Image (spheres, grey):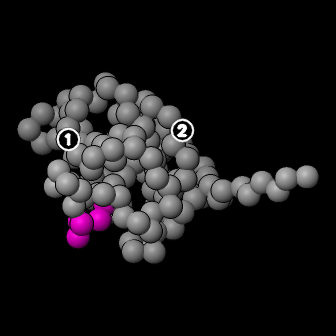
Amino acid sequence: MEHVTQQPPTWKDPKTGLEWQWESPGEMTWHEAREYAASLALDGKTDWHLPALAELESLLDRTKARPEGRPPVREDVIFRDNLSYWSSTTFEDDTQNAWIVMFDGAYVLSYCKSNLYHVRCVRG
């Protein structure tokens, strides 16, 4: 019988102390993402939130750069994907937009809150 290792529901970042949701629930609008985060109960905890832009960016390694100049995801971050994630941070110049981090190239851009992007909640 094959032994399957179950991944934990959360990961605590040793650099920042933030606790992250391991699996993304999928894509949703910014408003749906905020509602999802506010209602999330995971690993016995209910104080999850949609990460601020600075919290999402803490997953990037700003000491290194890819050939095109953008930083990669830090090597000690155990969940790795190339998806785009919502932050809770509204774009000041156009409040219909919010900031996302695109982990396929560490782009940090603002997009319309009605667009669909992935969600990974955080606490701490």
Going by the numbered disc 2, the residue's amino acid type is: Pro
Residue drawn at x 20%, y 38% as measured from the top left = 110
Going by the image, does 97 lie left or right of 24?
left
**Residue 57 occupies which quadrant of the picture?**
bottom left
Q: Residue furthest front?
A: 67
Q: Residue furthest right?
A: 1
Q: Residue furthest left?
A: 93
Going by the numbered disc 1, the residue's amino acid type is: Leu
Q: Main secondary structure of the magenta part?
A: loop
Q: Nearer the viewer, residue 75 or 24?
A: 75
**Residue 62 occupies which quadrant of the picture?**
bottom left
Q: Which mark is residue 41?
A: none
Label 1, secondary structure: give it.
Answer: strand
Residue drawn at x 23%, y 46% as measured from the top left = 107
Label 2, secondary structure: give it.
Answer: loop
Circles 1 and 2, Cβ within 8 Å, touching? The answer is no
Q: Nearer the viewer, residue 113 or 106?
A: 106
In this view, 115 is above or below 107: above
Going by the image, does 74 lie left or right of 4?
left
Residue drawn at x 51%, y 67% as measured from the top left = 12
Q: In this figure, which residue is indicated by the disc labeled 1?
A: 109
Residue drawn at x 46%, y 52% as measured from the top left = 80
Residue 101: horizontal and vertical position, in percent? Answer: 29, 46
Magenta segment: 60-64
Residue 46: horizontal and vertical position, in percent? Answer: 56, 54
Figure quadrant of the C terminus = bottom left
Q: In the image, is residue 34 part of the stretch drawn in magenta?
A: no
